[in-house]
Image (tube, coloured by chain):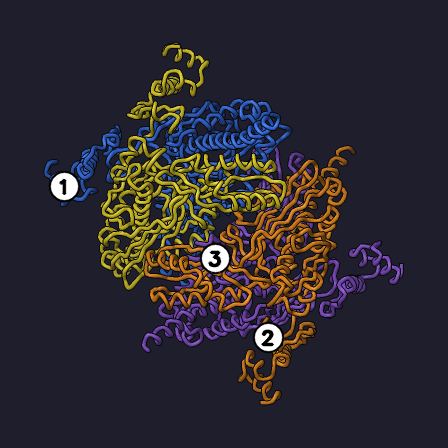
Chain colours: A purple, B orange, C yellow, D blue
Amino acid sequence: MNYDDVIREFKKGNIKMYALDGLIGSNKATEARRHFLEEAGGRKYTEIANTSLDFDKVCGKNAENTIGAAQIPMGVIGPLMVNGEYAKGEYYVPLATSEGALIASANRGSAVITQSGGAVARVVGDRMTRAPLFKVPDIDHARMLAKWVEENFDEVRSISDSQTRFTKLESFLPFFAGRNLFLRFSFSTGDSMAMNSATKASDAIASFLEEKFSWAKLVSVSGNMCVDKKPSAVNLVLGRGKSIVAEALIPKELVETKLKTTAERMADVCYRKIYVGSAMAGSLGGFNAHFANLTAAFFAATGQDLAHVVEAANGLTMMEESDGDLYASVTLPDVPLATFGAGTSLPTQKEALEILGLYGSGENPGDNCKALAEILSCTVLAGELSLIGALASRDLTKAHMTLGRSKR
Amino acid sequence: MNYDDVIREFKKGNIKMYALDGLIGSNKATEARRHFLEEAGGRKYTEIANTSLDFDKVCGKNAENTIGAAQIPMGVIGPLMVNGEYAKGEYYVPLATSEGALIASANRGSAVITQSGGAVARVVGDRMTRAPLFKVPDIDHARMLAKWVEENFDEVRSISDSQTRFTKLESFLPFFAGRNLFLRFSFSTGDSMAMNSATKASDAIASFLEEKFSWAKLVSVSGNMCVDKKPSAVNLVLGRGKSIVAEALIPKELVETKLKTTAERMADVCYRKIYVGSAMAGSLGGFNAHFANLTAAFFAATGQDLAHVVEAANGLTMMEESDGDLYASVTLPDVPLATFGAGTSLPTQKEALEILGLYGSGENPGDNCKALAEILSCTVLAGELSLIGALASRDLTKAHMTLGRSKR
Amino acid sequence: MNYDDVIREFKKGNIKMYALDGLIGSNKATEARRHFLEEAGGRKYTEIANTSLDFDKVCGKNAENTIGAAQIPMGVIGPLMVNGEYAKGEYYVPLATSEGALIASANRGSAVITQSGGAVARVVGDRMTRAPLFKVPDIDHARMLAKWVEENFDEVRSISDSQTRFTKLESFLPFFAGRNLFLRFSFSTGDSMAMNSATKASDAIASFLEEKFSWAKLVSVSGNMCVDKKPSAVNLVLGRGKSIVAEALIPKELVETKLKTTAERMADVCYRKIYVGSAMAGSLGGFNAHFANLTAAFFAATGQDLAHVVEAANGLTMMEESDGDLYASVTLPDVPLATFGAGTSLPTQKEALEILGLYGSGENPGDNCKALAEILSCTVLAGELSLIGALASRDLTKAHMTLGRSKR
Amino acid sequence: MNYDDVIREFKKGNIKMYALDGLIGSNKATEARRHFLEEAGGRKYTEIANTSLDFDKVCGKNAENTIGAAQIPMGVIGPLMVNGEYAKGEYYVPLATSEGALIASANRGSAVITQSGGAVARVVGDRMTRAPLFKVPDIDHARMLAKWVEENFDEVRSISDSQTRFTKLESFLPFFAGRNLFLRFSFSTGDSMAMNSATKASDAIASFLEEKFSWAKLVSVSGNMCVDKKPSAVNLVLGRGKSIVAEALIPKELVETKLKTTAERMADVCYRKIYVGSAMAGSLGGFNAHFANLTAAFFAATGQDLAHVVEAANGLTMMEESDGDLYASVTLPDVPLATFGAGTSLPTQKEALEILGLYGSGENPGDNCKALAEILSCTVLAGELSLIGALASRDLTKAHMTLGRSKR
């Protein structure tokens, strides 16, 4: 069929939306789908249309049934001084958001960090996980299967390795629940986020085990103990993606002049709001002020999987008075990240990573992604410092106002 | 200073990035900041630059320190038949994502729903919350303060009302923790997400209380019992934003022909993966397959706050065999949403809402946003159906392969 | 049959253990069962036999298939100065435990409290809950059922009232999950713990609703949202049993002379161990040092349901430096308690309550039980003070030792 | 001083309660303290006095400030057929409780299990844990300390070994939180519960590390990541004490004749109540019906630490229909247990263990305690079967009643 025939049949309903790409290419299919919606809606979607994305590259890889693109404003904070093992120096960090004041606030925190000589950032854990779930006849079979995997881990690893290039099986943990067995596999990932390759490897291992042990039945290649994109304790305890800590010592003077408060007050707000408050709220892992805001904006800018914000929102913020100065740290146990693959190669996202000098893989695979993790953690720290500072100083301001008023 | 002077001083470091907007306007400031980064990086960021956003409108309202925009591919699923109280009929639902296969998968689920006659969707709860935290001298003062607010709630409500237009204080709950008191205020919100207006109103109430009771000291206008953008039980139990349920009965034939499996198998995968798996993972609220994927893509397309994906990822999926048919439901207790304000008025996001016919506020304020909630819940249901179906059928496929092989 | 015949047939296996009571009375049945075990084991169980319990009263009411009694050492702490609304004055608090050092440690904390002028204790919430679970055809039926109960609450209350004497239905909350509906009923309870009467009342309501609405099917009179004897967030957020706060201000001198440390150190241990530690552990509600130790010993002594220790272990301890003094508080949201009924009327447990002057119901039903709650909370506070103090001073001791050593 | 002098001075308040033991021995001190309370209360506490405990043995080891003993009725269930690796055969299981119907209900479950050929029980994990918490200067020192322990684990183990006889250090996991480091040590324990020896060993290791690394400051030998007697995810995920699974296949006929229901109905109650209900309740680990009831009664009878019921209440119950039969299992990840030491050697508790043939340590240390774990898990399974069965059959009964009524 030629283009006009396809469009005609599509309008008649004889061709499905998703079938257009195969017939006329994704760029034209994108246009056709959008036109279809425009006719239905009686209006033009010119803004969604306004994109330089090449859908022939995008479709299948990043999206399907495309009609154009969403645009989210991108700004930067910086210079942010990062004293990492992989990221060293001052960075301008791109953030994409539609929430006013977020970037401005983080920029203030960034300035405080940089003027304090920067924040130390360390990647203390690094792995992607998948946990296939098997139903077996009984607990003894579950133990037998777990034991076999443990004793034949080299063979299992070789099955995994045959499936993937950068993603390498490192270890596993078995979890028993009646006649269900979860095998939580941990992979090293290089610079990619590696969810897909971890799934592929896990699937191959599962198929192998199913074939070897006819009584073992794969229920799901993901048994919700991985845990991908859901709140969970297992990720908090064992970590997933990058586990990162950032910390800075903010001198007394900076706390007072830039944040308009004191270390003691910030420590008090942190203790009452973040620890007592989140404990009262029944929070599991959410002992921070707004990790999610910064990670969401960072993820949107740099092409990370936005659903992973669920995991990255977990972690602890600490603010402590230390001889008048402020010790501040953020601990993020569960941040899936990539500088390579998936959303990172989309045009604007690639450029955002280039602003950081971290697009793709470098000489030592994995280093770029760890550097990105370090920068993210310092960005999150900047966000916490600014928000807790604002809350603490409001308090101070109020106190002054009240004092002033009472004098009148 | 004229433009050239400003740029020169900026390059010298005498003008801060964020100060440019006030001097040369945000559109030129955006360009200037981007050029600065381009010079530093020795490359052009033409894709980030490629946006029709009017930064004079965006800056301050949606972002600061802008340099351009991030573009995320947008596709649609549909027609998705929604049998809501507010949304009735077939919809094409825009989703923005960089994760391949997600839209295609949800589209399959959508087709199954629509061919089954649609999904029923109900908003079972609707409120925005803020919980200021007060430090008081002791538990008796905490009780006194809580009691006063209870007994003088009309006065408290009028303070709130004076601050906001659509956001109205409805109720409150006090929570005691030693000499700390949390007052969790619940607001009705119309069509806006209302986090900011709820904060403004809470701040006014808090200031009033601080002034009235000199011994009451506001620690933070958000005491982490709200809970905004963090994992928590209180939102799961009491709800936040929209609380939504969607359900559909998928006939046996459709399960078999479209999802290539059976209701019984899907129910088994759901039970073992979602309930046993998430229980084992120590999940609080994450009893689903991938709510976060669908909500993240829906949020990015329609201008919601991406950090709220953390909350929207909570909820329960149920798949049950019912005389051979499949009963499927999703329950989402905590979905902040808007059709009005913040990110919804950005150009592409506005158009995405227009595709749904739900941009802004209609005749009955609040109805558009509830309709959006209903559509979202059906979209999430589509995603769950497709993924659980795929997991269950893989299993079936494997069984067939094994059977076939054993015959040889 | 006469006694000898019964025993002969029992030994032959023709009479079941549990059938003995009906034939020869529980006291003789207890003996017969014990003898049976003694013959099987080839030894005597004289210690288990050594009890003055009257099994004709005990069996059916407190236990079945009895063979004797377990003895747990009982000690006291005190005098403990309690400044409650219901309990006022100095108390000797009975504790039954087999864990050495626990009573001694709590006694030290008690002395510190009493020398500080006592602890303030307040019951900030009081209710027993049961949450029947209904399966209904769909979400609309779930809403209809919840709405009917709301609109006809007086009728529902009268059904409840017809079943119980002291336990009165106060309110309810509906929770929706697909086509499941949980109705969480809250009851006032007087001086009994009221789990059984709350169950009875809930069962009557459920039967009524099932009959009225033929499509409503009771799945379980307890739908695990009550929540009885299981870890949960709903109890933490909404409270269950007695919700209690106790607090004390310990003067600097007492912290130093009795606890051998400083308020600052205790606050630091509390912050790092209880807040950072429990946050890291993924604790839901367990933000304390050892609530469970004190409540278990208190429960065993006073005849509470030992399984309720699971609920009573939840709560927050706060230790804060306040001008050199120590502010300490405990918040217990979920403590089922009784001074009347069930285990409280067993001989030793009754006496333990009499030591506190709180056995049974007094003039104002409910007051005794609230007084008991106040005393318990101060006992728990004593335990926290002593343990955190010991941890903080060990630290101090070590510092001194190291200093001393370094001088040599 | 002679006895009369001591008593006189004690009554005058010149001798403290706890000082009596050193002066007149614990048996007389127990009497003196009780008399003191009797005089204060104006009544006799003859029941508390009625004990054959030798307080000269008890005091210091199991309790202090003793005044007598609490008596809790003890019954048995059985014969319970246990198909364990360590416990094989039929057992009569002692349970001490004051809650009527519990033993009778469990006994019904026990009969069902035994008539089905018994339950399989397996200990899938076994360790005691302690997690000292160190404050260090910064994250790099935290990593350095963790790394040193890892690289010098043999040396660390030898320090531990020098402190304890049966408790042996097996492994450790480091957890990073800003400048705090938790070292979670795991020990094998033989037949004792080993909390005290694990603490002693951890303390010795901590002292060693503090001395070796002057910048490492022990905050607490227990940093709440152990986690002892508090709700937590880390124990759920990594296990603590005994991790146990028990399972049984109950034939269709037995479900119908003994439990008066069907496997299908029991599976449905289990799914809706235990999984949907506990998920809705925000339960972390409490995916069961009433583990706490059975473990509390088992613990009280056999001399376990009652506060550990908090941990033992965690776990999953599964009930699944399997060709008409019922597959039932319980998974308990976190059950601290002993057959040796602490409360197990008290007279009645020792006899209770002797009824099971499991007092103390046998030829292979650790085997008795594992056998006890297996029996406990089957007891818990019995409790779950009976309760879920009762809930399911009530439902059935109601259905019959309704049917019957509608026929009239």
In the rendered image, residues at marks 2 and 1 fall on the same chain: no
User: Spatial distance from mark 3 to mark 1, Cα to Cα?
Assistant: 57 Å
**Residue that numbered label 3 is attached to:** B171
In the rendered image, residues at marks 3 and 1 fall on the same chain: no
Q: Closer to the camera: disc 3 or disc 1? A: 3
Image quadrant holding the C terminus of chain B, namely top right
Q: Closer to the camera: disc 2 or disc 3? A: 3
Q: Nearer the viewer, residue B43 or A307?
A: A307
Q: Can residue A172 be seen here?
A: no
Give the mark count. Answer: 3
**Rendered image quadrant of residue C398:** bottom left
Q: What chain does badge 3 belong to?
A: B
Q: Identify the secondary structure beneath mark 2.
A: loop
Residue D30 drawn at (x, y percent): 21, 35
Q: What chain does badge 2 belong to?
A: B
**Residue that numbered label 2 is attached to:** B59
User: Spatial distance from mark 2 to mark 3, Cα to Cα?
Assistant: 34 Å
Residue type (three-letter) at the residue carrying disc 2: Cys
Above or below for B290 versus B132: above
Q: Is residue D58 left or right of residue C159?
A: left
Q: Can residue B270 be seen here?
A: yes
Q: Identify the secondary structure beneath mark 1.
A: helix
Residue type (three-letter) at the residue carrying disc 1: Lys
Q: Identify the secondary structure beneath mark 3.
A: strand
